[in-house]
Amino acid sequence: WYEYQYPPGLIKPDVCAPGTSTKSCAYYNNTSYVSGWQGTSMSCPLLTGTIALMLEKDPSLTPEEIDSIVEATCLDLGAAGRDNYYGAGLIDAYEAVMAVGGAAQVQGMFYVHNLGTANLSVTAIAYSEPWIASVSPTSFTVIPNDSSGVDVDVDTSGLAPGTYYDTLWIASNDPDEDPYGEEVILYHGVGVNEGPVVKIVPLKYMVRCYPNPARNTASVLFTLPRKSEISLDVYDAAGRKVSTLSSGTFESGTHRIVWNRKDSKGERVTQGIYFIRLKTEGIEAKGKLILLN
């Protein structure tokens, strides 16, 4: 809102980007890059590309967060501070991307909601992975029609790049969902210069495959909110059943099944797209796996 106070009134532009004698990827006479493109036709794509890199690093960024990061990392030009010639300054793609989730210690948050008519008492929150540094608080009471936030601190020091999963099991006096699960997903170093990003989602029936794409064996990871009778099957892109990976009763929690890329006859399947289907209690969940030669 401060931009609209008078004086000085609305400050535009928000930022600036190179737009003079800019080379493009279009060829001229098949000998060289075209140069000399001018104006916002060049500067806008540069800003768009910067935003794309930021969203690749953290897809959950809101427009407000993107705007704030881009402006905060600009190179100030002209008079000190914002002005009507350069706005907040010249965009700096590197600094903007590095400002997104670049710390080794990051934090996620979720809320425990009480939709009942009695007090909800949380007595403990359990987890297993060492990269979860702490969860706080682990015991509290939520009155009806209210909620309470829980912080999850993650430490990626010494952690190899990759995607990691854990489940927070929330013990409470809820007669229907005790314990209740919240899945923590950590994306760490998945892309170039990518810092850690934490996602916390309500735990439902999920199927994940890794590595993905895979060449030989692949792990199938699925999570159950409660003890269930399940079947885990592989289908090809045409919808034909290829193999049954597992079936039977599984306890609540996260389970891992390894597929050796063989069909029900024991023969190696060809490269392509395959779907892993988890079926339980009238509910289906699917994961997609790409196999390479």
Image (cartoon, helix red, strand yellow):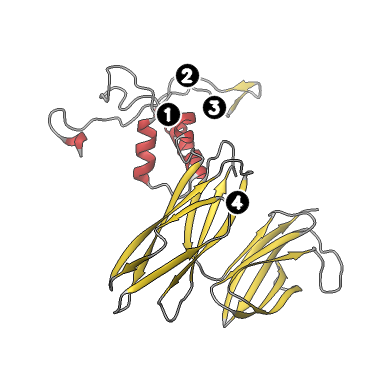
Q: Is residue 72 above or below residue 62?
A: above
Return the disc, 4 or 1, that comes first in the chain's sequence: 1
Seen in the image, is 109 located left or right of residue 10? right
Dot 1 crowding, Cα within 10 Å, few <14, some 14–19, many 20+: some
Going from N to C along the chain, the mark reached first, 3 or 1, is 3
The kind of residue on which mark 2 rests is Ser
According to the image, label 1 marks what residue? 43
* Of pointers 4 and 3, the one earlier in the residue sequence: 3
Question: Which residue: 68% across, 74% down?
Answer: 232
Q: Nearer the viewer, mark 2 or mark 1?
A: 1
Frontmost of labels 4 and 3 is 4
User: Distance from label 2 to label 4 (Cα)?
Assistant: 42 Å
Q: CA distance from mark 2 to mark 1?
A: 11 Å
Q: Label 2, on which residue?
A: 21
> What is the distance, in whole Å, between disc 2 and disc 3 at their CAs?
10 Å
Number of labelled discs? 4
Q: Secondary structure at mark 1?
A: helix
Q: Residue at 62% across / 21% down in the picture?
A: 32
Q: What's the amino acid at mark 1?
A: Ser
Query: Which amino acid is tagged 3?
Result: Ser
Task: Please state the horizontal and vertical placement of residue 205, each as a whole percent of the image.
Answer: 56, 71
